[in-house]
Amino acid sequence: MPDFVADGSMIATTRQKPVFRFAPSPNGRLHLGHALSALLNADMAEKLDGRLLLRMEDIDLTRCTPEFEQSIYADLAWLSLSWEKPVRRQSEHFDDYRAALDRLIARDLVYPAFLTRGEVKARVAASEAHGRPWPRDPDGAPLYPPDERTLSDAERRRRIDSGTRYALRLDMGRAIAECGQGQDLSWVETGDGARGTIPADPAAWGDVVLWRSDAPSSYHLSVTVDDAAQGVTHVVRGLDLFHATSVHRLLQTLLGLAPPVYHHHRLLLGPDGRKLSKSEGDSGLSELREKGLTSADIRRLVGL
Ligand code: GLU
């Protein structure tokens, strides 16, 4: 039996104090969409008498900076939010992600992938030029070609020794087979899109990257390991990550980690209908703070 009780649109765990987390990447300044996410986490944690954690998702050591991290603290404090300390920084936990990866490698579920983004793009273009559509993931990116799954160990060694850069990818077919029948690959969803028990479809993502060629770990691996390591019971984040949950559920199952409840909230769109983005400086919280807006103004602006 699941360990949950429903309360309106929220679900409380029955045995432990609920644990929520806001997990921004300090690779840019926060915008109104982040404010919605952070405030929702705080409101839901308060309503369920839970804890609120803050996690810096800073595995990309080239794009994440201490300045962006400091601006996140300042913006959240301005929103009158408080969180438990110390803040977990992913860059301080690469050993944890490596240990989880090694468990998957030991089960032969991971392989080195040598194709560059350009090479994949060229393959997709060649296939589509012949009228053969290339399968794409839920974000619209082409799936990684599967042929390197079966390279011989000798050929892998030869390429690695020659200095070719590589990522480590999950062999999705094997991973799903390993989970086997009887494993409940679904999640409990209480958010603004589909609700209820959602069947996970990790195959839609193909052979996801677990360890990037240009940075240690990957989003999927570190988020899965951290949510479990921090005892997170409720993941509240944007609907843009709804489908990624399929991969997280698969990794949780492979690694024997307890699944949280998920609440994927509506996204805020810019005037042109696009999702707000850090890189394009949309509705930056620091700018709004400098203009003299208050936390109550921001709540109104994000519809809370
Ligand atoms: N770090 C991700 C972001 O800033 C959020 C990850 C998550 O909430 O699972 O978009």
Image (cartoon, rainbow, N blue to C red):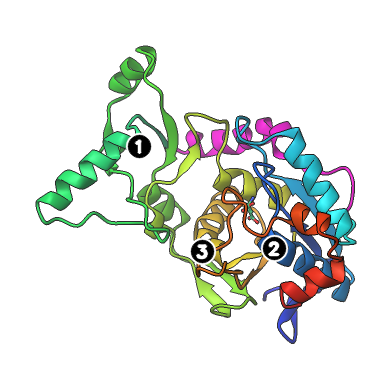
Q: Is residue 86 magenta?
A: yes
User: Which sits in the foreground, 72 or 173?
Assistant: 72
Q: Left or right: where does residue 203 sit relative to residue 287?
A: left
**Where does label 1 land, which residue?**
117
For the point 79% across and 72% down, which residue is it? Answer: 299
The mark nearer the N terminus, 1 or 3, is 1
Q: Residues within 10 Å of mark 3 (few under 14, many from 20)?
A: few
What is the span of residues highlighted in magenta in the rendered image? 83-108
Is 107 located above or below residue 45 in the figure? above
Under tag 2, what secondary structure? helix
Q: Which mark is residue 155?
A: none
Q: Is there any visible trace of residue 109 in the rendered image?
A: no
Say which amino acid is labelled 3: Gln
Mark 1 or mark 2: whose residue is earlier in sequence: 2
**Gap between marks 3 and 2, in whole Å?**
38 Å
Q: Is residue 178 above or below residue 7?
A: above
Please report whichever mark, 3 or 2, sits nearer to the chain's N-terminal start.
2
**163 shown above or below 136:** above
Q: Residue 196: image x %, image y %?
A: 58, 80
Q: Residue at 74%, 87% (x, y): give it.
A: 8
The kind of secondary structure the magenta stretch mainly shows is: helix
- The kind of residue on which mark 1 rests is Arg
The alpha-carbon separation of the residues under discs 1 and 3 comes to 34 Å
As drawn, the label of residue 183 is 3
